[in-house]
Amino acid sequence: MAEEVIIARETHELKGTVQVAGAKNSALKLIAAAILGQGETTLENIPKISDIDIMSEVLERLGAHVQRDEHSLHIDTSSVESFETPYELVTKMRASISVLGPLVGRFGQARVAMPGGCQIGARNIDMHLVGMQVLGVEFAVDHGNLVATTPNGLHGGNILLDFPSVGATENTMMAACVAEGTTVIDNAAREPEIEDLANMLNAMGAHITGAGTSTITIEGVPLASMHPCTHRCVGDRIEAGTFLVGGALLGGPVTVQGINPSFLRMALTKLEAFGCTVEMGDDSITVSRTQPLRAADIQTLPHPGFPTDLQAQFMLLASLAQGSSIITENVFENRFMFAAEICRMGADVQIDEHHAVVTGVDHLQGAPVESTDLRAGAALVLAGLAAEGETIVRHIEHIDRGYEDYVGKLRSLGANIERATIESLSAR
Ligand code: EPZ
């Protein structure tokens, strides 16, 4: 298929309401969790993004049947009998590693291709393995595949994570659901998506308490007692935050609908620090700005700290703010690639290891730029709307991984934006 690009042109006003889709970083794990219950699970509010298609394919390769009905997925895992995931799918999407815990839970074994790194970092899985080893899982590496076995069965244990890793918390929690005895995960990740996953697992028959806090306790239940369920995925806080930054950038008011404001407390606090007005409803957030953007410092941390997935978007805000902002990236070792692209548009960003000093400029200039990861890509599109002239964003497949109809939603807010094939550009 011909490469597509996004053409973003100078836009003076972005205002209106967008409906937030279901959270990519929850939905992917909810799909994996369906493995633990034999029968048809229905997941609602599942975004139409390419990562979901890949995870659905992973489950189908395991023997499940996945049928999409608009924003619902019907996943029948009755005939899942394989516990191997193919390399070509795992390399497409490293989040496929989330099937490891459920496969070990259901089969007592798994063979999952080792996920590679990606642009933002090595993305190791050592904490996943250490956590599951406490539960009695033994690992070996066989030609790029991680082979998990449970020679003495799956039993509960006390896990202390080095770092509150989202993936490690999820994999160990899913395996612990059907381990014999009690498991306690200390220094667990506290992201809202962890709580969403725990709520689904409990609806399937698991006994999990403490999800959303640093200490999660799982009372193991027999595998046979786990059953399918119907579960609605929470709204995507990162998609919501991305559109709120668009409103902050161009003045708004922009409202995001279908999101629990408590998921974004730190990001909303920072929007106010940048000079914005934030109003919260039960499941909506509105941002507007009438005064110039002012500099503010940010450091990314595990939830409830500032989300690393909004770091690029806020670097864009800082690039047009009065004064200098210091942005510290504490979660990934290489997540400043966005800076190089936005400097091509006239921003002033100095990188020093995991600090970025962003000195605001009066305006950005449109330019051809490249998405390096889905969040940087989404931020580059917003930069193009704020910049003078025209910005061509390439490698937008990254954006399509995590944003459903990004162009359509921005257009509904008044953005001067379109998708085009790269060939049509040369024909202009
Ligand atoms: C999840 O990744 C998200 N992805 C990421 O979102 C998000 O940035 C991240 O959590 C942090 O919030 C999905 O949920 C699919 P981690 P995950 O385990 O689980 C290191 C996006 O843009 N680490 O909390 O991989 C790791 O390398 C994506 O939607 C180890 O060293 O995040 C990273 O530096 C990007 N060993 C840090 O910890 C391990 O065993 C945080 O990783 C596990 C992690």
Image: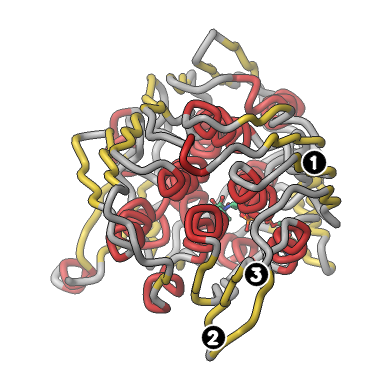
- Marks 1 and 2, how far apart at CA: 30 Å
Provide the residue designation for mark 1. 184
Q: Residue at x 78, y 44 (%)?
A: 185
Is disc 3 placed on a helix, strand or loop? Answer: loop
In the figure, is residue 174 to the left or right of 7? right
Is disc 2 placed on a helix, strand or loop? Answer: loop
Task: Inspect the image, locate mark 1, and give the three-letter code of the amino acid beneath it.
Answer: Val
Q: Residue furthest top?
A: 281
Is disc 1 placed on a helix, strand or loop? Answer: strand
Ligand 1 placement by image quarter: bottom right
Provide the residue designation for mark 3. 151
Provide the residue designation for mark 2. 144
For the residues bearing labels 2 and 3, Cβ distance under 8 angstroms = no
168, 137: nearer the viewer: 137
Task: Pinpoint residue 62: horizontal percent, then vertical percent.
Answer: 33, 63
Disc on the earlier residue, 2 or 3: 2
